[in-house]
Amino acid sequence: MGLVGGLLGFGVGLPLGIAVAYLVHLRFFAPRRRLQDPIIRPLRDLDSETLQTTTPDIPLWVKCPDYERVDWINKFIFDMWPFLDKAICNTIRSVIRPTFDQYVGQYGIKSIEFGHLTLGALPPTFQGIKVYEMREKELVIEPVIRWASIANVIVKVKVHSFQVSAQLLDLHIMLTPRVTLKPLVPSFPCFANLFVSLMEKEKISKQIANLYHWPKLIQIPILDEASGATKKPVGILHVKVIRAMNLLKMDLLGKSDPYVKLRLSGEKLPSKKTSIKMSNLNPEWNEHFRFIVKDPETQILELRMFDWEKVKMHDKLGMQVVPLRLLTPYESKLFTLDLLKSMDPNDPHNKKNRGKLVVELTFDPFRDDSNSTIVMSDGEGNVSVKRDVPPSGGLLLVSVENAEDVEGKRHTNPYAVVHFRGERKETKIIKKTRDPRWNEEFQFMVDEAPVDDKIHIEVVSKRRGLRLPFRNKESLGHVDINLVDVVNNGRINEKYHLINSRNGMVHVEMKWSTV
């Protein structure tokens, strides 16, 4: 009983003693401090920078009149986020897949894949958007984005017989990007590229900021390059398919009937083909082809060889590619290419000898519009100028913009037809209008300047549905344009009165580029 009483007294007396000692210290020994009134400054005495730093959580549309309140965007994103999350994640998977594949087979890596990928249930919010004044063919905006995401991203890497996983959780982002939409074009979604750069360096990692801090940009193509809206032609690629050697035997008699298909990446035009060499394992073609080049730094010439068959599908003999960045402007380069089964470096079928293909490539850039000099690049960012190059062939660009006051006797569903040197090009049909707007561009490659040529443009109306042939189409007028002014001036942009039309006019822009 005495032991229990002693423990109880110790347990109660020790805390009580400490409390009494602390009160005595505060009363007699602790220094007395006089509470001072806080310093209060009116907001009118603060400059804008100090005011913004002292009120970081107030939205910018409150602090800065240049930023607009966009609650409707946040409501829209919140309602759409479950679907946006899946769509964005699917896009990430498809975009990252080629990057993952580049490392498969190296350093013992057997596979790289996403184990889990979601951006979470919380969408980003816009605290304001600043819109700059509309410039010619571009629009600039600066949104303020805050995002406290509960993302969950798991990447699984299989190395030899081991599997390693990396996980990203709780992604927090605060940034003010500058978004530029340019050029503005008359094709949905009405801009061809999206440029993004970051305006606030202090709120993100220094490594990421150095990559994309203004004026450095991320360019995101929106429209297909084949539409002509993203990139303009910069030159002509001349390809000479010379010969092939030691091809595979595909026929029963130990022969093949080879031909070559040629295509330039970034284009949706049909492939060009050589002639067929019957029963020949060492064919010679010496055939020439020309392609319009829009980006010599990224485009690739694709060469695919087939064995022609009369009935069944043509057999593949092999393929190879040539990046245009390997070419020096105006210099012909000979390539002897080993034919492969596929461009997959890990394909075991590529070890089989499929023969060789010999081609000669020449890239001729267009001249600078301002003078007779020619601007050249070595593919590494170094630019040089070559002068006094004799003129030769080139590219004629014909853009049919619109027509005015065209009207048919029976119907008015107009489209334009362009005739030049035996080639025929057509615009789309615009239904039921006297003032159609096409904004379509056509390209014609020629071997010499068309100073003595004319281009024939006719506006035609086509009745929709099943009609008698002689009542199905109707000419609304035509015009013949001499090209000598285009060649001498490099570009014309004019409206022409249509012949056989009362008041009709057609608006045409043409550009001549020489190599």
Image (spheres, rainbow, N blue to C red):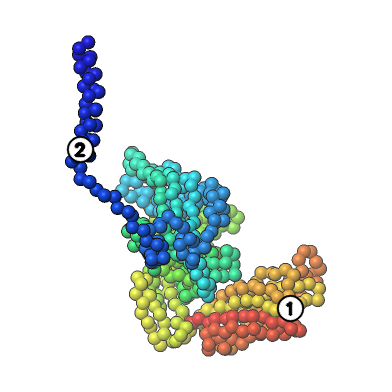
Task: Give residue 53's position: percent from left, percent from top.
Answer: 37, 60
Residue 446 position by quadrant? bottom right
* Nearer to the camera, 416 or 336: 416
Task: Label 2: state its secondary structure.
Answer: helix
Q: Is residue 103 above or below residue 444?
A: above
* Residue designated by label 2: 25
Q: Mark 1 points at which residue?
A: 406
Determine the CA span between mark 1 and mark 2: 102 Å
Residue 162 falls left or right of residue 401: left
User: Answer yes or no: do the residues labelled 1 and 2 have beta carbons within 8 Å?
Assistant: no
Q: Which kind of residue does numbered mark 2 sit on?
A: His
Q: Residue furthest front?
A: 28
Question: Within 10 Å of the Cα at label 2, are there few (<14), some (14-19), or many (20+) other Cα atoms?
Answer: few
| Residue that appears at 62% across and 77% down | 400
Above or below for 274 versus 341: below
The structure residue drawn at horizontal position 41% and vertical position 65%, both measured from the top left corner, is 44
Can you tell which quarter of the image residue 373 is in? bottom left
Picture coordinates of residue 100 (x, y %)?
40, 51
Q: What is the quadrant of the N terminus in the image?
A: top left
Q: What amino acid does circle 1 point to?
A: Val
Residue 440 seen from this side? yes
Percent across and percent down for residue 475 are 74, 77
Nearer to me, 140 or 482: 140
- Mark 1 vs 2, N-terminal side: 2
Q: Which residue is drawn at 53% across and 72% down?
A: 134
Residue 138 position, x and y percent, is 51, 71
Q: Can residue 417 be seen in this view?
A: no
